[in-house]
Amino acid sequence: MFRSCGIALHGMRSLSKLVVSLCVGIAIDSCRYVVNGDMLSVHTTIWQTLKDRVRLTNMGNSGFVESITIKHLLTQTTGYANAGLLVTASLKGQDMSRLLDIVFNEPIISKPGTHFTYSNASAFILSAFIQELTGETLYSFAQRALFAPLRIERHSWGRFGKYTAGATALSLLSQDLHKLGKLVLQRGIWGEKQVVSTAFMEKMVEPHVRLGGEMTIEHALSPTGYGFLIWLNRGGYYISGAGGQYIIIRPDKGRVISILGNERNVTPLLECIESVL
């Protein structure tokens, strides 16, 4: 948390992933970027753009990394099994300039698109991809293409090495966090401007991954699926961050709820959320 003139910026933790998804949508919508001879889309493979920035030593990954698409990253179906990849505890003592090497050499155990594992790795890879593709950091891209239209004027975003962290470390004012939820509710429209296309927003909240069984923990936000870096449930969709951070979007009620908790035990908070949904 940062303070200036008595107004606090709040660290967003995994709520940062929402901005990654929205920025990817804006980049695709712009029709400005060509990869491998084709216009950028969710089906674009990312390895051609990143391979010169990675020292791949785990050759068992070579066939997999070449087939990873933006959609695999957005839906957390890259093929990793390690859900702790790039969490804060795992970064202690790491050479932050080598994180892209570390991520791409982490064992990929499943063909991309076939196995869901929630982690910080996908959003970080997308951040690196956006930077290498556009020539500007994800943070710079977000300031220009997303924050400016929403009049989000105070912010910061930490880095992992030379890349914007992506999965975490974004800091915003609480009211500006709420704007991001409203943008999702309004299907990418802010005022009279279509900031993110309706087509991308619709794809963003589709159940690209269906969850159930052992993945389901019964509470107010029990996930039924996963979209583009966003959880889906029976009432709508949400983004969550460690310690009780939530943006909850309920299209059926035209409602957005933003919560910036900092609790070890979020059960009482979830019970409170259930009472207002």
Image: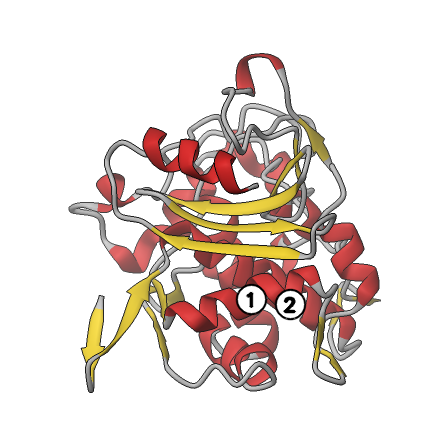
At x 64%, y 58%, the residue is 48
Residue labelled with disc 2: 183
Where residue 81 appears, as percent x and y from the top left, is 48, 26
The front one of 27 and 33 is 27
The front one of 267 and 156 is 267
Tag 2: amino acid = Leu
What is the number of callouts on the image? 2
Q: Classify mark 1: residues with Cα within 10 Å, few (<14), some (14-19) or many (20+).
A: many
Q: Classify mark 2: residues with Cα within 10 Å, few (<14), some (14-19) or many (20+).
A: many
- Badge 1 vs badge 2, beta-carbon distance below 8 Å: yes
The front one of 262 and 82 is 262
Residue reaching furthest left?
A: 93
Residue reaching furthest front?
A: 275
At x 38%, y 71%, the residue is 172
At x 58%, y 57%, the residue is 256
Q: Is 26 drawn above or below residue 49 in the view shown?
A: below
Disc sitting over residue 96 in the figure? none
Quadrant where the N terminus lies?
Answer: bottom left
5 relative to 259 in the view: left or right: left
155 relative to 123 in the view: left or right: left
Q: Secondary structure at mark 2?
A: helix
Q: CA distance from mark 1 to mark 2?
A: 5 Å
Residue reaching furthest top?
A: 213
Residue labelled with disc 1: 180
